[in-house]
Image: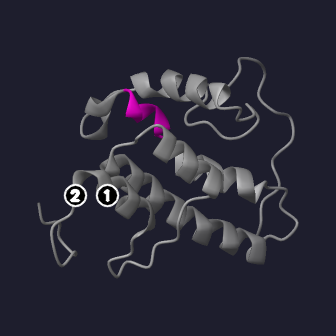
Amino acid sequence: MVLAGYPGPVEKADWLERALRDDPGWRLRSPPPMAEELLVRLDAPPRLATHLRLVHDVAVDITAWTRHRCPDLDLDHDALLFGAATHDIGKVSHIGELTGPGSEHEETERRLLLVEGVSPIWPVSRRPTPPGPAPTSRPRTCP
């Protein structure tokens, strides 16, 4: 099979590796090593790995901007970047949600990350907001 952007045939076994590391001119940054290792261990579909790499790449730019513009903002940039690189990782078990609607991957994602030893204080996609009164103070913002 020939993939766009590659000069010759690509073996199926190489697709995930290429999705995570190759750069056919896009200049995308690789996900954090822990996220990359997790995607390889789970044999993530290349489409999912590419999506997570793209989201992570944008998150790198956003966190760099916030560090520069809002140096006093209390953000865990490493946690944000890991979250960006794993925010849909539950889709390894819900392949249909890669191209269609669905939210079953969210609970799978939470469990998967906990089993893998990821602290629940790190970002997990669409974690429900706990019930209770609204916060009384406004979060700090930047100019």
Tell me where residue 135 appears, x and y as whole percent: 81, 33
Left or right? Give the position of 45 relative to 83.
Answer: left
Q: Residue furthest top?
A: 131
Residue under numbered circle 2: 11
Amino acid type, residue under disc 1 in the picture: Asp
Residue 91 is a magenta residue: yes
Magenta stretch in the rendered image: 87-93
Q: Nearer the viewer, residue 3 or 53?
A: 3
The N terminus: image quadrant? bottom left
> Would residue 21 be seen by someone viewing this image from the given angle?
yes
Q: Nearer the viewer, residue 78 or 69?
A: 78
Q: Nearer the viewer, residue 99 or 115?
A: 115
How crowded pointer 1 is (Cα within 10 Å; few <14, some 14-19, many 20+) is rated as few
Q: Secondary structure at mark 1?
A: helix
Instruction: Give the quadrant of residue 67.
Output: bottom right
Amino acid type, residue under disc 2 in the picture: Glu
How crowded pointer 2 is (Cα within 10 Å; few <14, some 14-19, many 20+) is rated as few
Residue under numbered circle 1: 14
Left or right? Give the position of 63 relative to 138.
Answer: left
The C terminus: image quadrant? bottom right
Query: Residue at image x 37%, y 47%?
Result: 48
